[in-house]
Image: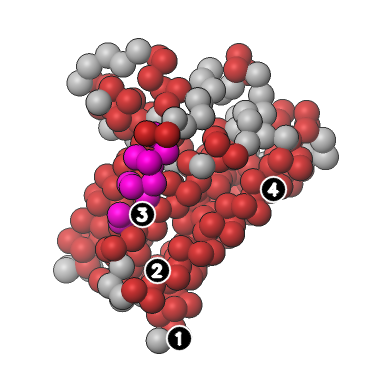
Amino acid sequence: MLHILAAFIFFTRLPFWRLTEVPSEYFKNIVSRWALVGWFTAGISVLVLYASSLILPANIAILLAVITRLLITGCLHEDGLADFFDGFGGGTSKERILAIMKDSHIGSYGVIGLIFYFGLLYTLLSCLPIALAGSAILAGDPFSKGVSAMIINRLPYARKEEEAKNKTVYNRMTTSEYLFCLFTTLLPIFWLPKPIYFLATILPIIVFYMLTFLMKKKIQGYTGDCCGATFLLCELSFYLSITIIYTLI
């Protein structure tokens, strides 16, 4: 239970830390519980989406749902996405990319990347009926986190542990952690209303392998910012797939 609590403490900004003190070593194994945290963040976001859609236009309800997750997570993943765009956009060597990503200032690549990301996210979800948008979020958030969690099994950490932003390097998953991650990743897919929407899981996996290939080539590993960026881009590709399927059928 402490591993799960550690994951909720790290991946959200809600005061779970008040429940009990969690030793620092437990935070090395939180990535396998990332998808489970996605159940929570998606659930709260969709609750806001459905409740607000009863009294507000659908596009406003979607915007409120997006804002809700930003507040819950403290923009943790979005910060990583901005740093990822800055680093890989402006860096020409491993050392330079890592240095840019560690810089707390946001650059032009990060700003432009976030603008396009939020624009696509809002537009894609707005193209869907509220019920389908809610189902897509309930499935896409934890599924994309689970897929992205596999980065720690696929790549080594690109920095030295003492150079990590949070001073923690994640351990590779054990067999039991891998199975737990797989279960919490795949189960939410059944929120989707029709089996044909299961095809939306293909593109995020492709995006994951493309991004990890790029990371391996450029920095020979991953960082925490890479984790956040991979999640958001996989999730965006999931919603893109859902929108394409909805349009075609």
Closer to viewer: mark 1 or mark 2 = 2
| CA separation in Å, label 2 and label 3 | 10 Å
Residue carrying label 1: 248
Work out how far the residue at label 1 is from the one at label 4, CA to CA, in angstroms: 31 Å
* Kind of element beneath mark 3: helix
Is 156 or 42 nearer to us in this picture?
A: 156
- Mark 3 to mark 1: distance in Å? 24 Å
Q: Examine the rendered structure and indicate whether residue 240 appears above or below residue 234.
A: below
Residue picked out by circle 2: 198
Residue 19 in percent (x, y) is at: 20, 21
Q: Amino acid at mark 4?
A: Phe
The secondary structure that most of the magenta stretch takes on is helix
Rendered-image quadrant of the C terminus: bottom left
| Amino acid of disc 1 | Leu
Three-letter amino acid code at disc 2? Phe
Closer to the chain start, of discs 2 and 4, is 2
Q: Residue at x 40, y 14 (%)?
A: 24
Q: Is residue 69 left or right of 54 when viewed as pictured?
A: right
Residue labelled with disc 3: 186
Q: Which residue is mark 4?
A: 213
The mark nearer the N terminus, 1 or 2, is: 2
For the residue carrying disc 2, how many other residues have a C-alpha within 10 Å: few (<14), some (14-19), or many (20+)? some
Do the CB atoms of the residues marked 3 and 1 lie less than 8 Å apart? no
In the picture, measured across the screen, residue 64 lies left or right of residue 82, that is left
Magenta segment range? 177-188
